[in-house]
Amino acid sequence: MFSSIKRTTSRKIVFAILALLSLLVGVACTQAPTRGWSGPTVNEDVLYVGTLDGKVIALANVSDSSPTVHWEKDIGGSKGGGLFACGSGISKPMSTYGTPAIAAGKVYIGGYDGHVYSFTTDEGSMNDFDTGSSIIGSPIVADDTLFVGNSDGDLYALSLNLTSQPKWVFKTGDKIWATPAVFNGVVYIGSSDHKLYAIDAESGKEIWHFEAEGAFLSTPAIANDTIYIGACDRKFYAIDVATEEQREAASSGTPAFSKDAKWVFDKARNWFWTQALVYDGKVWVGSLDKNVYAINENNGEGDIVRETKGVVQTPPVLMASLNLILVGSEDGKIYAIDLQAMDNSRELPFDFGAPILAPMYADQEKGILFFHAQDGDHTLYALKIEPDGKVEKLWEYRTDK
């Protein structure tokens, strides 16, 4: 089950997928792909991830060199809805694009078949809710509510039991492929209609929207009362969060208004399609132009801090105790940005031979990086990073087995 790295022609497959994804700006009606990628989430030494062939896997003892399968469950069905949206039915296997969320003893994940699934962390008992259209982003849990968007452009607020009717549904003007963010009772979600929306989490009323020149596919990063997010117009934005007064006004019926940006960063040469990391006074974010940027969070001044040889779609992750920021690339490598010696940024001593596109998970306490490489088998890896810079591969696991 735990195998050596298998090199395949999957780069060509991923290139084809990314080429199809670019049709977002072209509105062509095409057959939807049924395979995607999911980032791992780790909780109490158990890793949860969606797989290539429509399963959710729980691996136990993942900080050891020999993890074991805790449980494995099939998801999916005959209902599609389509990433590129012609609404035709598609059959299993269905994939999961989003990263699982953990809350109250349950694992939540969105399926490409349009269902939100929940599994108990102990035995994997399942519930689900059908949103009616494919889910590309990840679900987010805040307090007692789950928020998730779908490719019909609907943002759902659901009870955690998934068996009740939605608390509310907010309609945007186009597909939602992004993951929402929640801060101080407000949900922020980007849409392919070029807008970022601020929505009252309790009432589902729109507070304001910000409009860019391209679709929003990435997840907002929120720090110091500011939203940081990039779009498919090659620009990266800083926007003030909604105030409590604005939230109360929206709930009482005051119409939503258009929001302006605090600053705009426009040096990238391609789209932003990943969540940023805000740390040490800077906004760290990758672009499809193959570069990682460091932007001053106060004034928007910044430039390339690391070049890679592939698109950067994974969010940067922080290993604070090691003074490292780690970024995966489509070129099959992981790059370490040393915060104490910026000019000594380096590649980790492995070439995984397959694109790294899904979000990674960093165990800060144990210094372990978990990630999912998009080879033909979609292999999971765990890397142990020591304070002296030594990197050890703890294990690898083929999710197709």
Image (cartoon, rainbow, N blue to C red):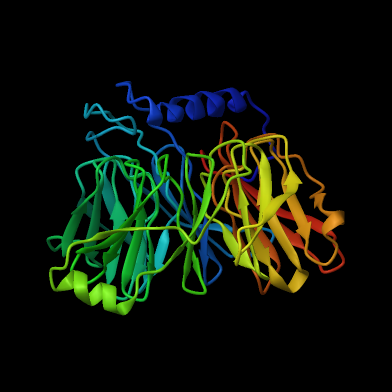
Residue in the picture at 68% in, 29% down = 7
Q: Position of residue 232 (x, y in %)?
A: 47, 39
339 horizontally vs 193: left or right: right
Look at the picture and state if 86 lies above or below 386. above
Could you tell whether 118 is left or right of 87 in the image? right
**Tally of numbered discs:** 0
Could you tell me residue 23's position as x and y percent? 40, 26
Q: Is residue 163 above or below residue 194?
A: below
Residue 316 sits in which quadrant?
bottom right
Can you give x and y, in whole percent of width and height, for residue 362 in the image?
Answer: 62, 63
Q: Position of residue 229 (x, y in %)?
A: 49, 55
Q: Residue drawn 59% across and 27% down? A: 10
Snapshot quadrant of residue 126: bottom left
Relative to 185, say whether 166 is above or below: above
> Residue placed at 42% from the left, 40% from the top?
213
Compare residues 227 and 119 and report the one nearer the observer: 227
Q: Quadrant of the N terminus?
A: top right
